[in-house]
Amino acid sequence: MLKFTLLRRTCKQAAALTIAREDRALKLNDAVALRLHMMACKACPEFENQVLTMRAAMGKWRNDPAVEDAKP
């Protein structure tokens, strides 16, 4: 059984995991640690929402026909 301290993450580590999760699946211990941190922290869920908003906006931008027309 993992000790709770092994699942502890700082806000800086949680932010890095949030960004890494955009590119790859997290290891189980990192995913659990991130979820626990998100439940205990007020700032990190807001950061996560900002990352999700940026991802959604970039997805819309990538699929915008005006952007396609501007490519050389």
Image (tube, helix red, strand yellow):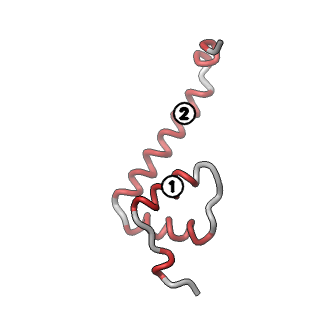
Residue 37 drawn at (x, y percent): 43, 67
Left or right relative to 1: residue 45? left
Residue pushed farthest left? 42
Crowd tier of the residue under label 1, counting other residues whose Cα lies within 10 Å: few below 14, some 14–19, many 20 or above: many
Answer with mark 1 or mark 2, whichever residue precedes in sequence. Answer: 1
Point 43% across, 45% down: residue: 50
Identify the element where label 2 is drawn. helix
Q: Looking at the image, which residue is at 58% across and 72% down?
A: 29
What is the total number of numbered labels drawn onto the structure image?
2
Q: Position of residue 69 (x, y in %)?
A: 63, 12
Q: Amino acid at mark 2?
A: Met
Rendered view: 31 above or below 16? below
What residue sits right under mark 2 in the picture?
58
To which quarter of the image does residue 1 belong?
Answer: bottom right
Numbered mark located on residue 65 in the image: none
Q: Which residue is mark 1?
A: 18
